[in-house]
Image (tube, rainbow, N blue to C red):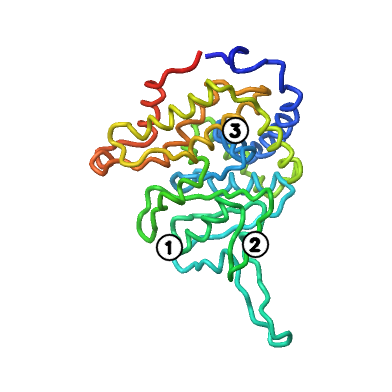
């Protein structure tokens, strides 16, 4: 379906505002693509989440490039970056920080943890205990943390990239629904084609291209792009389409818990970001459909019997997309 100019918006409106967004995204994508091959679709959605102010969960089997993709994105931005390797013995204070008593001054001084950064890589997040995982809830939802009764704001850019392995269960703790709901997207990279895998071997034959990456954009440019994305027009008919999709997941067969109102807001923002990446000043149903499964599937709680029978959240969202009328 080609995005029409009516009723969703004027095709000439907003092009100037979204032009810098496309330029920024192209620079970042081009830089990351020198390291990560064959992941153009995943990278487009990852950039949409970054520009929409959301967080991303990269879920796939070992060796598919999850951590490398996260590090390549971080190195493409002139922004502070910290990595936390989640383990079962990791404590909340290892993430948030701790107040230490200074005898010389007879006072406590706060030592900030790695969460106080602009880009945070939470590697193998499901290896930490639920208590430690919950340390990120406030940070991801509100852009702040509360330590020792004091509210401490995080940087404006704050962006979490988390990874997890879906096939290994020993020594892992499934992310609770409240945690999953704070991720704008769950992306799976999958395996490369034979040609892409051969090209990857050639690229990495003489060294590690990740070490050669240099920043192509700064935090201020990303924040400016976020402001431009927020101005992308969403017609009332498209807003209602987003709401209908989200509400349909709650009534879908085999679903114990459907997508939340936060999911509707996130889906709209992601669609705005995709429209900006396409140089459009308005959102079409195509943009909503493109990102719906990645934005909604991980938020759904499936009936236990259906889940054991092989039912997946993506299947439910695809059925909802077929059932809900598209605005014309």
Residue beneath disc 1? 129
Residue located 60% across and 72% down the image: 98
In terms of sequence position, does the residue under pointer 1 or pointer 2 come before the other?
1
Q: Is residue 171 left or right of residue 89?
A: left
Badge 2 marks a residue whose secondary structure is strand
Residue beneath disc 2? 152
Location of residue 63 in the rendering, given as x and y in whole percent from the top left corner = 49, 47
Q: Nearer the viewer, mark 1 or mark 3?
A: 1
Badge 3, how many Cα within 10 Å: few under 14, some, many 20+?
Answer: some
Residue located 40% across and 32% down the image: 247
Location of residue 260 in the rendering, given as x and y in whole percent from the top left corner = 44, 40
- Asked if 35 appears above or below 11 in the picture, the reply is below
| Marks 1/3: CA–CA distance | 32 Å
Judging depth in this view, the residue of 10 and 287 nearest the camera is 10
Residue beneath disc 3? 44
In terms of sequence position, does the residue under pointer 1 or pointer 3 come before the other?
3
């Amino acid at each position: 379906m080609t995005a029409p100019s009516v009723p969703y918006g004027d095709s000439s409106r907003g092009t100037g505002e979204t032009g810098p967004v496309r330029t920024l995204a192209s620079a970042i994508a081009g830089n990351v693509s020198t390291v990560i091959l064959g992941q153009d679709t995943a990278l487009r959605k990852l950039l949409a989440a970054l520009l929409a102010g959301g967080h991303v969960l990269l879920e796939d089997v070992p060796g598919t490039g999850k951590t490398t993709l996260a590090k390549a994105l971080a190195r493409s931005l002139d922004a502070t970056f910290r990595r936390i390797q989640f383990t079962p013995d990791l404590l909340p204070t290892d993430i948030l920080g701790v107040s230490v008593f200074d005898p010389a001054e007879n006072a406590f001084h706060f030592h900030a943890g790695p969460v106080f950064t602009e880009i945070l890589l939470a590697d193998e997040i499901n290896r930490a205990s639920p208590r430690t995982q919950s340390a990120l809830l406030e940070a991801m939802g509100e852009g702040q943390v509360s330590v020792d009764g004091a509210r401490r704001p995080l940087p404006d850019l704050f962006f979490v990239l988390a990874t997890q392995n879906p096939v290994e269960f020993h020594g892992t703790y499934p992310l609770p629904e409240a945690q999953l709901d704070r991720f704008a997207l769950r992306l799976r990279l999958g395996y490369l084609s034979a040609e892409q895998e051969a090209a990857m071997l050639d690229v990495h034959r003489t060294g590690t291209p990740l070490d050669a990456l240099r920043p192509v954009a700064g935090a201020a440019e990303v924040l400016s792009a976020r402001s431009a994305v927020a101005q992308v027009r969403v017609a009332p008919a498209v807003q209602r389409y987003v709401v209908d999709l989200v509400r349909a997941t709650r009534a879908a067969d085999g679903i114990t818990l459907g997508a939340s109102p936060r999911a509707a807001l996130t889906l709209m923002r992601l669609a705005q970001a995709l429209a900006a990446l396409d140089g459009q000043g308005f959102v079409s149903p195509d943009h909503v459909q493109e990102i719906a499964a990645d934005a909604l599937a991980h938020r759904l709680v499936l009936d236990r019997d259906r889940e054991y029978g092989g039912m997946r959240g993506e299947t439910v969202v695809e059925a909802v997309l077929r059932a809900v009328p598209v605005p014309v």
